[in-house]
Image (cartoon, rainbow, N blue to C red):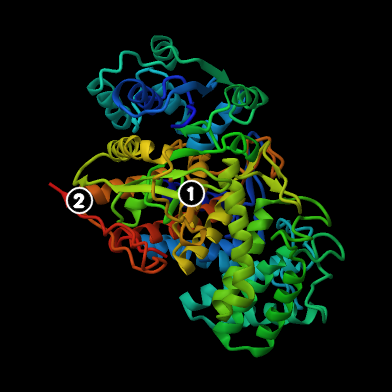
Amino acid sequence: MADGVVLLAGYRRAPTALALLWALKRRVAEAPPVKAVLCVNEFSPRRWRQWRRRLGPEAVGRVASALGFRTATVHDAEYATYRERLDDWNVPHRSLRRLCRELDVPLHVVPSLDSLTALRLLDQYGPRHALFTGGGILRASFLERVPGGILNVHSAWLPHVRGMNAAEWSLYYGMQPAATVHLIDRGIDTGPILARRVVDVAQGEQLGHIRARVVLAGLDLLLEVLPAFLRGEAAITANPKEQGRQYYAMAPVLRGLVQHWIDTGITPVCSPEEVAPDDPRPAPMRFVT
Amino acid sequence: MSERIRAALDWLCASQDAVAGGGSSAYYVPIVGWFPPYPETTGYIIPTLLRAAAVYDYPEYAVRALRMADWLLALQLPEGAFPGGLYRPRRPGRASVFNTAQILLGLCVMHVYSRESRFHEAAERAATWLVREQDPDGRWRKHAYEPEFSPSYYAHVCWPLAVYGKQFGDPEVLRCVERGLEAVLSDRLANGAFVNWGFRPGAPAFTHTIGYILQGLLECAVALEAWDRYGAPAADSCARLLRRCETQGRIAGSYDADWRGDLSFVCLTGHCQLASAWLRVYERGGDPRYLNVAAKALDEVCRRQRLRPGRRLHGAIAGSHPLYGCYLTMRYPNWAAKFFVDAMLDFQRRLDALDAGGATHG
């Protein structure tokens, strides 16, 4: 068995980090010990710049929502879905600080995952593996300190759709949304693949809801493959960089278009180019009723 | 979306009504008011108005474009060139290569619309003058904004010439275009930037002049059906700019030759021009990342557009945001509204096509 993992979180109320930590401690029998949680300080100027860069003018509403304030943003559906999962699993707290205290796991709030503080903490704990739920792009200095690899859940079928808003870009192409569990390497979503799972979409479903369901499906998949991976028994698939593209945050007008397609039951046709024969992308999207 | 386009068009109409003769006022300055008409930008506003007249089935825009073209014909110099600078009746401007080319574009499009030979004749004289003034190495050093300086944004001189050459089947003009484009491409650096892409030698370039270069090359590539030679290098620069904008989270107001951007302001005109360039690349290859970044650029301009119905600035777009930014400080130029309308119409067309046909993996 491995010598423990470190959990990486993007902010202190990150629902995926809360769910993953709770599952590792209370729900999964073969789970590795969690040595510590490293959480990026969402109040640092650097972090705010990253949020603004990723989300543009919506950053304020999104961050406020993530911090627990009631906001009327398009992401309400996403956070409601996460909250449902936390309620289903009886996660007792909505902040990592409180949950870590209850579970007796050290929590360290760091300025960024590239900071010296974070790197020193890694040296101190010496984890063989890490689980990533957010916190920005990891640099080589961080990756080198986790010899067994860092696992991440990506919200699309790799290698085809990399980068941000991957669930939305999958839907743009009429591909069935999917979650991929993969190892992080120096590229953007280019690390070896451990497992993939498609997620059904219902006509009229909100994009935020789909996003959250994809992430949660990925979380479940991660918990399923984690024991085998830690034993060194997981099948690993290549993730050829040339087969995919890196996408960026989707503009509101395109999100509106994708939502319109979902509302009206349009499934844009994706052509089979760029798909390797031994690695078919998920079937073109079909709505479930 | 169309409300904003209509507001910008209304503002362009107001800029025409604000001055006598039929030209479009160069810009509006708060407190000071409207400035004299600008022949260069009046020239390239003509295609915008004619296109809007067709899209919205609103003939008044075409009538206004015709008045603009009539006004421009009266300004043509005996040698065929058009004067640079703002129009001042008592102080006629000197011949200008760049301005003549932009007016040439308006004349070509007006000829297609009206079929009147006077526009063809004026266009022919302008094109002949431009060919004559070109140096053997493809550059135009005389009649420049900066003496003896032939900037890379003269790609936007080649585009009207290419339109003229194709429209009237003039091989000499097309050879002139090819020489001009080769000169521009010789300014291109390995990192996708251009040596002389600003208004002055070695100066950082506003996104406005970057837009001129990219649009000039891309439109020439389409007109000459030579994408690999002229379009692909411009598309590569577009891709580099896209990546920079997406990872930085915003488009800078200007860039130096190492792509170091000045983020203290945004050049709203440049936003619209870059959006049009990205949309052209999207149309060519179907990569939605270009559509996406164009949408974001136009989103930002929409947020900065003045919308106060009944007020003088309704529909206007400033040169810079903030208004005191480096490009056209405290001014609302007519070409910002022009490029905004062009880009928005381009975007709307692509979005309508996408909505009708769905996306394909390009």
**Disc 2 and disc 1: Cα gap in Å?**
32 Å
Can you see residue B119?
A: no
Residue B169: image x %, image y %? 58, 89
Q: Please report the residue visible at 41 percent of the width from the left and 23 percent of the height from the top.
A: A66
Residue A264: image x %, image y %? 20, 51
Residue A145's disc number: none
* Furthest residue toward right: B148
Residue type for callout 1: Ala
Nearest-to-viewer mark from 2 and 1: 2
Give whichever of B176, B187 is nearer the camera.
B187
| Quadrant where the N terminus of chain A is found in the figure | top left
Q: Please report the residue visible at 45 percent of the width from the left and 13 percent of the height from the top.
A: A97
Residue B89: image x %, image y %? 73, 59
* Residue B78 image-quadrant placement: bottom right
* Residue beneath disc 2: A264
Q: Please report the residue visible at 42 percent of the width from the left and 54 percent of the height from the top.
A: A237
* Residue beneath disc 1: B8
Q: Please report the residue visible at 39 percent of the width from the left and 69 percent of the height from the top.
A: A273
Q: Residues within 10 Å of mark 2 (few under 14, many from 20)?
A: few
Q: Secondary structure at mark 1?
A: helix
Residue type for callout 2: Thr
Up/down of A202 relative to B152, above or below: above
Can you see residue B243?
A: yes
On the picture, is A247 further left or further right than B236? left
On the picture, is A27 further left or further right than B160? left
Q: Residues within 10 Å of mark 1 (few under 14, many from 20)?
A: many
Give whichever of B23, B133 is nearer the camera.
B133
* Furthest residue toward front: A1
